[in-house]
Image (spheres, rainbow, N blue to C red):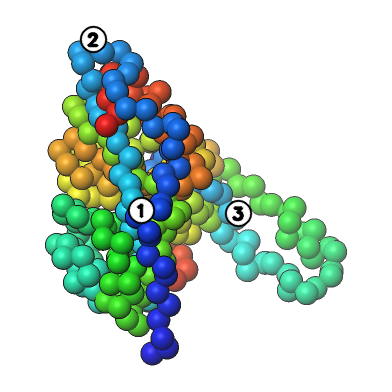
């Protein structure tokens, strides 16, 4: 799989680190909260779609920036890769 | 502006290469066509990372240009006889020079526009030159080293398995590979093994 980093250009999967579901970020409970059901849901409940999926990847073996990558879990085809965070 | 922190310069007479005892000069490997690549450690050097504050990228690039006399711009990497610089991430440059005063001249030049981190003691710069350099590097990195994909003076960040590496093209067939000093011996070994096929000289 090749991800086109907006800064570095197309790079091999081995340079990237998967950082989770991009659309699950907002669902994280308050870090001080101890609601076990809420944490359980955040950590384990996945929609696991067959098709388009938005993911956070870090280009850890490159520019080290975090990317929001939209990818098909069926074909591995990548629809988009955008920088997120500062200097995006 | 607060008094800037300027790191102690490299003491070139006292500095020791991480390859001491492992840097054997000569020719090695398959020498049927002679040594088709030359490997060298460039040592000692001053090595810095410049991290521009948001919005100060152009000013920071201009400051690096002033400090090193390199033909650098915000988007153009550069190499000269005694210095080199490339942008390895948005707003971040690796700057290398023979002059041990580099951390000081850079810190003064960038002022409030960027932060300078002295990496001289933490990075090792290895050079490969010769007609088969791309073949050797292609076995180590998932990068397209062809001239049109990797133009002269361009620098990039990549990795060899878990060894993070920065690579700058410094000549027609010459590339500098910058690795963490603690990985220098492991990577030197990998580079030599990869060069055996084409025959190599260590200078
Ligand atoms: Zn990148």
Do discs 2 and 3 share a chain? no
Instruction: Estimate the x, y position of residue B134 in percent, counting from the top left.
Output: 26, 31
Using the rendered image of the protein, determine whether residue A81 is visible from the camera's viewpoint.
Answer: no
Using the rendered image of the protein, determine whether residue A66 is visible from the camera's viewpoint.
Answer: yes
Identify the image quadrant of residue B52: bottom left
Which residue carries the number 1 mark? B13
- In this view, the residue farthest toward the bottom is B1
Secondary structure category for the residue under label 2: loop
Which numbered tag is attached to residue A18?
none
Q: Residue at x 32, y 81 (%)?
A: B111
Of pointers 1 and 2, the one earlier in the residue sequence: 1
Which residue carries the number 2 mark? B32
Residue B44 vertical position relative to residue B149 in the rendered view, above or below:
below
In the rendered structure, the residue with mark 2 lies on which chain? Answer: B
Q: Residue at x 84, y 70 (%)?
A: A34
Residue B109 vertical position relative to residue B68 in the rendered view, above or below:
below
Which residue carries the number 3 mark? A20
């Amino acid at each position: 799989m090749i991800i086109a980093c907006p800064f570095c250009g197309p790079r091999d999967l081995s340079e990237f680190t998967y950082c989770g579901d991009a659309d699950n970020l907002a669902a994280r409970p308050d870090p001080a909260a101890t609601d076990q059901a809420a944490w359980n849901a955040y950590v384990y409940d996945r929609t696991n779609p067959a098709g388009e999926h938005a993911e956070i990847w870090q280009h850890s073996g490159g520019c080290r920036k975090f990317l929001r990558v939209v990818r098909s879990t069926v074909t591995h085809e990548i629809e988009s890769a955008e920088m997120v965070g500062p200097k995006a | 502006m607060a008094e800037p922190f300027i790191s102690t310069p490299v003491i070139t007479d006292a500095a020791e290469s991480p390859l001491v005892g492992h840097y054997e000069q000569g020719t090695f490997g398959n020498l049927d066509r002679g040594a088709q690549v030359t490997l060298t450690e460039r040592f000692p050097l001053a090595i810095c990372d410049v991290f521009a504050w948001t919005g100060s990228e152009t000013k920071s690039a201009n400051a690096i240009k002033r400090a090193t006399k390199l033909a650098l711009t915000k988007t153009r990497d550069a190499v000269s006889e005694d210095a080199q610089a490339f942008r390895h991430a948005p707003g971040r440059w690796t700057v290398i020079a023979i002059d041990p005063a580099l951390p000081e001249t850079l810190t003064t030049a960038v002022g409030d526009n960027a932060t300078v981190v002295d990496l001289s003691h933490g990075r090792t710069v290895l050079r490969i030159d010769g007609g088969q350099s791309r073949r050797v590097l292609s076995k180590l990195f998932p990068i397209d080293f062809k001239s049109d994909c990797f133009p002269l003076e361009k620098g990039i960040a990549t990795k060899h398995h878990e060894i993070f590496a920065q690579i700058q093209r410094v000549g027609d067939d010459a590339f500098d590979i910058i690795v963490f000093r603690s990985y220098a011996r492991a990577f030197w070994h990998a580079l030599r093994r990869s060069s055996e096929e084409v025959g190599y000289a260590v200078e």
